Amino acid sequence: MPQKKDNRVRSAKVQRKTSETEIFIELNLDGSGRHSIDSGVVFLDHMLANFSKHSGIDLTVRCKGDTEIDDHHSVEDIALVMGTAILDALKDKKGIQRYGWALIPMDEALARCALDLGGRSFCVFKASFSRSDINGFSTEMVEHFFVSLSRTLQANIQLRVIEGNNTHHKIEALFKAFAYAMKQAVSITGTAIPSTKGTL
């Protein structure tokens, strides 16, 4: 459905500092996919740039993390802050489509994402990877990224790799499927809260 005219500014800035990471994220749900990403984890930069480009969400990410230990804290905390930022930008969620879904191929890989911005946190993730690491990014952190994101975004996110052999292709297809599902879910298609409860 075409996006309706909406005069609200749906953007957010969130900062989080711990003994393990220092993170700043700024985003605009109604952007054009502009991005500036420096997570400290090169492959995650590539995935977040893809997310921004394909969702149309403008995204700035800055993270200084303890990557000398490993990538876990940076990846997890970026997901937590990103979820918080998207939720803040959604405001009262009035008029959003709420649900989004996508089926994305990348060469031999095929990934599916379905999500609900309905206020309940849950993540179902079905994928396996033959490589344990891509340029400092632990492939086990793909699932953890989306689990952490679902928690602060208060969203139900279901992701599955249906076909594929190449680890890079499978992960990129997952992030792109998530991007297109998010683009659909945050789109303004009405004026009311999309719930029989009257609140999300």
Image (cartoon, rainbow, N blue to C red):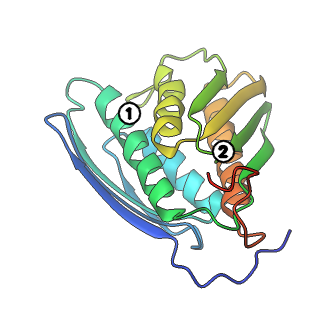
What residue is pinned by disc 1? 76
Image spot of residue 98 (x, y percent): 71, 54
| Residue in view at x 42 percent, y 50 percent | 84
Of callouts 1 and 2, the N-terminal one: 1
What residue is pinned by disc 2? 178
| Residue in view at x 74 percent, y 57 percent | 194
**C-alpha separation, residue under disc 1 versus residue under disc 2:** 17 Å
Residue 156, located in which quarter of the rendered image?
top right
Residue 97, located in which quarter of the rendered image?
bottom right
| Residue in view at x 63 percent, y 54 percent | 199
Question: Does residue 42 appear in the picture of this structure?
Answer: no
Question: Tag 2, which secondary structure?
Answer: helix
| Residue in view at x 48 percent, y 26 percent | 144
| Depicted 60 relative to depicted 22: above or below | below
Viewer-closest of 85 and 179? 85
| Depicted 76 relative to depicted 31: above or below | above
Q: Is residue 101 left or right of residue 15?
A: right
Image spot of residue 46 (x, y percent): 50, 47
Question: Does residue 75 appear in the picture of this structure?
Answer: yes
In the rendered image, the residue lying farthest to the right is: 1
Q: In this view, does 51 lie to the left or right of 102?
A: left
Image spot of residue 140 (x, y percent): 49, 20
Quadrant for the N terminus in the image: bottom right
Q: Within 10 angstroms of label 2, few (less than 14), some, or many (20 or more) residues?
A: many
Type of amino acid under label 2:
Phe
Type of amino acid under label 1:
Glu
